[in-house]
Image (cartoon, grey):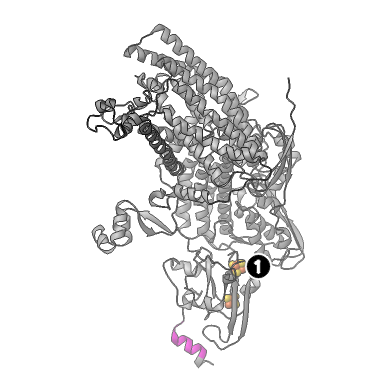
Amino acid sequence: MNTVLDSVVFKFIYCMLVSSDECANSFKIIGSGFISEKYAIIGFLITAFFLIFIIVNGALVGVLALIWGERRLVGRFQARLGPNRWGPWGIFTPVADAIKVMFKEDISPTLSDKFVFILAPILMVVPVLMIFAVIPFGEATFLTDLNVGVLFVLAITSTNTLSVLMAGWGSGNRYGIIGGLRAVAMLLSYEIPMALAAVGVILMAGSLSIIQVIESQVIPYAIFQPLGFLTFLIASTAELNRSPFDITEAESELIAGYMTEYSSMKFGLFYLGEFMATIASSAIIVCLFLGGWKGPEILPSHFWFMIKWILMICVFIWFRATFPRLRVDQIMELAWKGLFELTLINILSIAILMLIWPDPSITELWIMTGIKWIVFFVSLWIFGKLLGPKPLQKNGVARKIVLQK
Amino acid sequence: MFGFGLIKGLFVTLKNLVGPTFTVQYPNKRVGLIKASKYYNKNPFSLFKSHPLEGFKAIVGQAVIKEFPDQSPRFRGQEFNWFEDRCTGCASCAKYCPLGIIEIVTHPGEKNIQEGTSYDIDVFDIDIGRCMFCGICVEACPFDALHMGSGFERAIEKRENLVISVDELRSAEKRPSTWFRPQMEKSSYEPRNEKIEDSHDVGRHEKPSKEELTKRWVNER
Amino acid sequence: MSLRTEPVTMNVGPIHPSTHGVFRMRVTFDGEEIVDVEPVIGYLHRGSEKLAEERTYTQVVTLTDRMDYVASMTNNQSYILSVEKLAGITPSPRGVWLRMIAAELQRIASHAVANGFLINDLGAWHTPLLYMLREREKILEMFEMLCGARITNSYLRPGGVFMDAPDQFWPALNRFLDEMPNRIDDIERLLTTNEIVLIRTQNVGVLKKDECLNASITGPVLRASGVDWDLRDKNPYDYYDQIEFSRPLGEIGDNHDRFLVRIFEMRESLKILRQCIENIEPGPVRPKEVPFLVRPPKGDSYVPIESPKGELGFYLVSDGGISPFRCHVRAPSLINLTLLREMVLGDKIADLFVTFGSIDVNMGEVDR
Ligand code: SF4
Ligand code: SF4
């Protein structure tokens, strides 16, 4: 119980309920609660329930906001307005969407495997909610400080592979099966660069706990190790099934991929899970690479976290609005021939630099950053030459469009 | 370098993010204080007096004003405009309609405004549920009696109601489009804002004076 | 060790997000690789050719609008040229210039739609498509000024066009000509150097020169394979012989070449439009003596034109009556579609839709 009470939020609510000496010491103004220390476990449970309530509902509201924000923002990227009819600036559009989804007919196809079919959407949402447990939303505002936080996050995110496969298989539809199989191939491959990119961070921080990682960031790791940041960003875009890696849904190819046969609230749950995953992994990227809640003192730490979080989500939306989709084999090629090696280079360079400066001062850190950027450009150039589109040659001349007079 | 093209693309979308949008907000649109007061033709303060609710909404940019898409005067739209005085009941329009959806029944009548004795119209049904607004009927009308309309808001719940009867044609608002009527284009007439009541104004010829008419149709007979 | 795999057959379409209408393919694939494709057409058959036998020559114009509904003006043009040849009508010069302007605008609009949907098939979230549609919107607005409709134009009549362009048309056209090159540059910046577009389209769906010629493929698809065949140049109709323009030719004939050829052709169309504006002269748009009810003498005629999709021609037979005795359409979409199977065999599933999009077929024209 004591480790849990490290979190200020938790402790605050707990101390309003339970009277104990420890509480009296830390919150002098509030004093002690009405539950005697003998029944502290009741206070503990109530607190826990309360917090879960806040987090789950906070995530739901976040999803609604994201749906609205994404549609508005993609609209503006495409030089149109986006939804603006329902409520001021269209902010009630996702609410209307949710109501519509709830009242749709719930169809399960005859060929479907009912148990798997129903279980899949649930499996999509629940693990994503668990990620929020380890995210610090501000200084000392977190639910738990797991000492294997980064590992926990990586483990939890990979469970949605299972859900996608179950959905694809269970719906008994060929589009669904193709989508599901593509998902397994892609998500499993991208686990590896994602984990390896996180290794670079862990090496520097010397800890797996997310709090420790944030505290170790004198220079945000996005600047300090651009290679790791880039690979992590790409890999998490792929993990999220977002454009340009949305081959599992692939609207123009597979209609909706593994979700083709889903309707009503089951579809709603998939939708929810996807958007929640976007929110969660933006938060993870902010924690691991952008310095979490750190920032100049003018604003409270929560604001900094919020600002970085929203910016990160906007970057994902920006990607979605700009890039066409990659093909399946190209995606696998990128993961195994590109990102995998890039992350290894990243780890290697960090390890060497840490051998040279085991305990770097600020200037030494900046020197390391410079070296890392050089490594970044050189390795990207080499891999671009090896993997990128080759200018097609014909009779030794780069091809072009001829204008016949 | 690899990835350079992608970054260029990102900047193109970024440019469009801050650029103008091309959405036309059709039935109404939400505007701020300045545009709202312009719409109500008031200065912002008197707007609060006359339309307090709209005024407060306008502060947050939510005042609702009507908005129509730009529409060319030649727009071939709903609500055929038919001028009974000009129509002789020749049924050319019915004959030339590619779909044959105009039904005309006439009997000899005694109208003598322009061309002497003509026929009275009993039935003039246009089944606009099947009409494709090609305007060939209008092109075929030798007396400039039938015109395309300029509206487009005629959503109706029942198919039967899509047949325009002669009474509807008589009582409809006369906002003829200038499709195939060059004479109306010359006077820079705008169907959205103006109505044409006098059947002479839509014809190809100058409006004859009353004396002339009397001379032609009464005295010289 | 090799895995034992089994080919699966799947119905793509007739209702599918990227079949550009109602087109059905029975696709057999092994893993992600396509083994067989069998196109099934006819879902949009409306019997336009038969209907034309029951209509007068003017009424048929409305049917041609609906064949290739993203390029109505060129359809009108092809049909009207055939009627003029059949009835021996000499068109008025101003009418001809006007309909050339309309046709070139339509070519830009059609290519914009084709390229936009091609990139949409690649999986871009509608962004390039909407940029293209924004430009098309301006063209459609100009069409509305010209003839009161945006898609089903029916603007052309035997002998020219039915009405002169209104006053507000010319400033709008000039503004469009000034803006459009920048817009095309924008699109090129977004797409032509985009690495994802490059690796997705290069060397995919290759059509060799002789394959194209054997299957009588025309239009941008043929030019992307490097054959210099443009009917505006080789068999000039209207006043295209008085106009200078160049024809973009691809080298390999893959999807990327087809994409680029369309982009370049948009630029060439802008050039043609400028020359049309210079050359246009005042006068009647339609000879007075052409009756509303054209009654051509016995005989037949066929005038092919270069529509945005390829060679489009109406074969009309007259028995001296007020309506054609027989009407047949050489629809470029249908003929360009014939090589789809050869183009996609051995590619991945995702490439099927890109290749299909790059041919730029219009189901209204395929099934008629
Ligand atoms: S607009 Fe065309 S279809 Fe409609 S009534 Fe007139 S001729 Fe017939
Ligand atoms: S509307 Fe015109 S064409 Fe039709 S009956 Fe009257 S005069 Fe004749």
Q: In the rendered view, does B66 fall on the left or right side of A195? A: left
Was residue A221 drawn as part of the magenta stretch in this picture? Answer: no
Which residue is found at the position 48% from the left and 12% from the top?
Answer: A348
Q: Is residue B166 above or below residue A29?
A: below
Question: Which residue is nearer to you in this view: C233 or A280?
Answer: A280
Residue C52: x percent and y percent? 71, 62
Magenta segment: B208-217
Answer yes or no: disc 1 within 8 Å of ligand 1.
yes
**Residue lying at the far front of the rendered structure:** A38
**Magenta: main secondary structure:** helix
- Helix, strand or loop at label 1? It is loop
Residue C275: x percent and y percent? 53, 48
Question: Which residue is nearer to you in this view: C34 or C138?
Answer: C34
Q: Quadrant of residue A79?
A: top left
- The kind of residue tagged 1 is Leu
Residue B136 can be seen, yes or no: no
User: Which chain's residue wears label 1?
Assistant: B
User: Which image quarter holds the N terminus of chain C?
Assistant: top right
Q: Is residue C23 above or below residue C227?
A: below
Q: Label 1: how many residues lie within 10 Å, few (<14), some (14-19) or many (20+)?
A: some
**Residue lying at the far left of the rendered structure:** A29
Q: Where is mark 1, residue-wise?
A: B99
**Residue lying at the far top of the rendered structure:** A356
Residue A56: x percent and y percent? 43, 38
Where in the image, quadrant-wise, is ligand 2 located? Answer: bottom right
Q: Quadrant of residue A341?
A: top right
User: Which image quarter holds the C terminus of chain C?
Assistant: bottom right
Question: Which residue is nearer to you in this view: C306 or C193?
Answer: C193
Was residue B214 drawn as part of the magenta stretch in this picture? Answer: yes
